[in-house]
Image: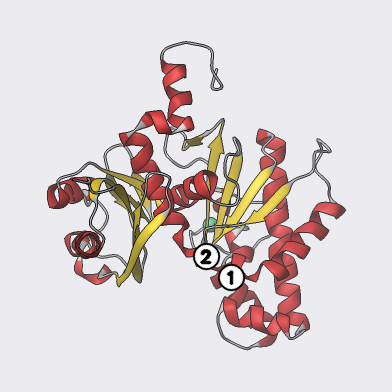
Amino acid sequence: MTRAPEVVAGVDIGGTTTQVLLCAGDLRVKDRLEVSTPAAEGGAAMVGAALDAVRRLLGRTPARLLGVGVGAAGVVDARAGRVLVASDSFRGWAGFEVTAAVEQGLGVPAFLDNDVNAFLRGEVTAGAVAGEPDVLGMMLGTGVGGALWLKGALYDGPEGAAGEIGHVPGFGELACTCGGRGHLETLASGRSIAARYRERTGRGGTGRGVAEAAGRGDPDALAVFEAAGAAVARALLVTAGLLDVTTFVVGGGVSRSWSLLEPAVRRALLAEPPVSGRPLRVLPAGLGEDAVAVGAAARARTELDPHTAPTAAARRTKRTGRAGPCD
Ligand SMILES: [Zn+2]
């Protein structure tokens, strides 16, 4: 009798859609399902939709489910598996006990991460920066999120906010969605790219629309992308100067316009090279829409079977006091 293959599930709960993947031990995607997120119906409904999707996948791809990793937008307590702060578009999500609900529903261990942390874990484990020990990940989506991978492990800081480069000042004077001023997000998010273009031209639309206009040579659209790229370059320089991190991975909807963004970042870095003289390596996300769900699955795999994961091995070495890459 052959045993069913073992899988972990990766779940990405976004504002409009929830992506669910079944991943093999090496994180290869075996099957996938995308369902709409019932964001207005509360936490139980959102997790319920994800669990239904996992069950449907297991129905058509027989496998033994070992655990589930969940990536979710907002501020989360990754240790307690609970959402702390969520945007207004999610009803009844702040305070929701995500991992408890998943464990109760499926009878396997579950783990929760902030979506940007999950994105970076996915890219470092199986994406554009696979195997890199030190990386800043940036998601240029509706807003701008950041996450930090240091010495082969996610570094989230004492308050879980390490790497949040999207909301530090020093990027101009414009008002940010968070209430602050001059944040990277005011220039480099999809929403901001649309807003900056509207200010210049009076024409509305989306960030994607501005990218299309830039592709047609529209000088205002090109100028908006130039400013976005220069701001991203500044964020990279700050990170490199502070942490000596020189590898960067950029995801989110705006990164799909890499052919516009990348030359602008390069020009800004040439004009203002890093103090260390070490070149900065900037890559677009390699896993595309899968990055958050793959990263969430990678977290589950690491927690469930630390022997297979180099990052967990490094942490174990540190805890036992032996010399290792973290010491
Ligand atoms: Zn802000």
Q: Is residue 57 left or right of residue 129?
A: left
Image height of 318 relative to 126, above or below = above
Q: Is residue 61 left or right of residue 176?
A: left
Provide the residue designation for mark 2: 141
Q: Position of residue 217 (x, y in %)?
A: 77, 84
- Which quadrant is the N terminus positioned in? top left
Provide the residue designation for mark 1: 192
Image quadrant in which you'd find residue 219: bottom right
Three-letter code, disc 1? Ser
Sequence-wise, the earlier of marks 2 and 1 is 2
Task: Please name whichever residue, 15 or 36, is drawn nearer the observer in this view of the structure.
Answer: 36
Kindly report which numbered mark, 2 or 1, lies closer to the viewer in this rendering.
2
Task: Please name whichever residue, 296 or 91, is drawn nearer the observer in this view of the structure.
Answer: 296
What residue do we see at 72% from left, 54% from top?
233
Q: Is residue 205 left or right of residue 25?
A: right
Mark 2 element type? loop
Q: Position of residue 154 (x, y in %)?
A: 48, 37
Q: Position of residue 89 (x, y in %)?
A: 33, 68
Q: Alpha-carbon neighbours of circle 2 within 10 Å: few (<14), some, or many (≥20)?
A: some
What residue do we see at 48% from left, 11% from top?
322
What residue do we see at 18% from left, 62% from top?
48
Three-letter code, disc 2? Gly
In this view, the residue farthest toward the front is 1
- Which quadrant is the C terminus positioned in? top right
Identify the mark at residue 229; answer none if there is no mark: none
Whether residue 241 is visible to the viewer of this picture, yes or no, is yes
